Amino acid sequence: MATKKDGKIWTAGMDNAFTGQTLTSLELINETSNNTTLPVLPEVWVLKIGGQSIMDRGRAAVFPILEELIAAKDTGIQFILGTGGGTRARHVYAQALDLNMPTGMLAKLGAGIPVQNARMLQMLTAKHGGIMCYDDDFEKLPLYLRTGCMPIMSGMPPNEFWEKSARIGRIPPNRTDAGVYLMGEFLGAKGVIYIKDEDGLYTDDPKKDPNAKFIPEISAEQLIANQQDDLVVERVVLEYMQRARHMKEIRIINGTKKGNITAALSGENIGTRIYSETNQ
Amino acid sequence: MAELVQGDGRTHISSGLMRESLVSTKLLADTHHEKVIPMVPDVNMITIGGQSIMDRGAEGVLPLVDTIIKAKELGHKMVLGVGGGTRARHTYSIGVDLGLPVGGLARIVGGVEEQNRNMLQFLLAPHGGITFVKDHFQDLQLFLSGGMIPICIGQPPYHFWEPPPLKGGFPDNGPDVGLFLMAEIIGAKTMIYVKDVDGVYTDNPNKNPDAEFIKEISALDLLDRNYPDLPIERELLRTLENARLVTSVRVINGLNPENLIKAMNGEDVGTHIYSQRALDAKNSGDNT
């Protein structure tokens, strides 16, 4: 016969600070808001290879970038690559939107494309240690890194059908920028760098507005307050940065300019740095 | 027929979103649509509380199991989901003490929910109880048309990718959110949270005898009131507010199991929480 406490099955030793509490208790939330968390892989960079900006350019953009990355790896710099989706993701979103499908379905569909891109990069870098790392292999990252491999992942977070609808629109708010960022935050990584085909952040999309001005450094708070229509990273990343414990800055660099990746991995201040000074 | 478009160094597929960053607020507004297609619209999604029901053992669980069997005989289609309860809290307490990041807590907490799911499946197996896991999400119709009762865990599969919480050290997304999101993609007929209190109160009624019962409230209003304690996750309220298909939920007391069948029949039991945004859109005739 089971022992009970307040009508619930009870075992000696189960008592803890959260026993019997709903986890929505404001008191409990306040108590845990200053707890420190440990970094999981603090020496590892998390890099994102843009889908539309890099992969869709094909050989001309991809080959020199991989060359630079392999050279960096061979000097002992550790990193994980996450891929974006790009044009085919946009196409499948357009198709699903036309069919009136919900956000969760779009997220499920969108997840397929970055995996294709990750597999492409793996084939190209296999001879240098490129290895596919699926979500279920995530805990094997130390093995891959210690054996000199270059883990390549889809940048998409595993949300799929569980992706929440945004207030406005039906495009999944968490896509590959968010997935790569959250991976960096969980790992307490050395940094998160987005490798794109623009020098960084501009006041508008520089491909469409020739008067758009380059922004070398800006806070996430300021960037949200500016309410500019277009951005170089997904909006949710700017929100997450403000609440994050570890990853309080990100960098966006132009991977189509030779030397930029090497410079960024050596800690040079290139591209755009977005940071947050908010602490919980 | 989609065409390939080149000329700027990239190969695009001609589509409405061609060359777009997908971040533009103008573009996102263009993709807005209140009405989306449901996947399996005649299902009831039922959340069985971990601490509130499962942890009560036979006394809390068996009458509810009998009611679920009865509901199935009455022709109700159901998907059941469970929370983790006391063991989830113990997991968090050890995890927080060890300094695990929030994504780590989100990754491990589902383990105790699986135990609750397995127990419920065991009890319901003679009546069609079957485990329902993420990879079989699209087999839902197979299970339902075979007369089964799919039973799943609640924690959404964000795992290491759990976003940093708005406040505090726990994942914002727990089983209430995860099961709601499943209901939302399914386009479920009802979303019912089975707990051990009559519904939502102004405070935890098990601790504060002066807590007042709330019969009906919008998710937005309930969030704004910032009550010290709630029987459902706060993130559920934010998620419900933005939902397109499941625009209201009900919190009922499962210690009176007949409430469950009443709720599936659309009767006004427990607390009804609705999306203010969806109601406003409906009232303004926005069906676009």
Image (cartoon, rainbow, N blue to C red):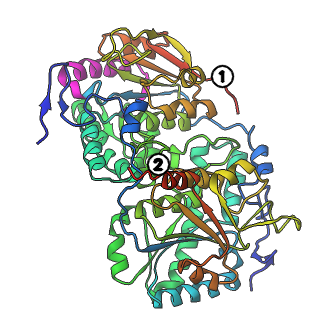
Q: Which residue is mark 1?
A: A277
Magenta-span inclusion, residue A58: yes
The CA span between labels 1 and 2 is 28 Å
Magenta-span inclusion, residue B216: no
Between residues B99 and A96, which one lies in front from this camera angle?
Answer: A96
**Residue type highlighted by circle 1:** Glu
Q: Which residue is mark 2?
A: A165
**Residue type highlighted by circle 2:** Ser
Which region is colored magenta?
A56-82
- Point out the tag, 1 or 2, that comes first from the N-terminus: 2
Pointer 1 local density, CA inside 10 Å: few below 14, some 14–19, many at least 20: few
| Residue B54 sits in quarter | bottom right
Residue placed furthest toward the front: B284
Tell me what residue is drawn at x 27 percent, y 42 percent.
Answer: A94
Q: Chain of mark 2?
A: A
Q: Chain of mark 1?
A: A
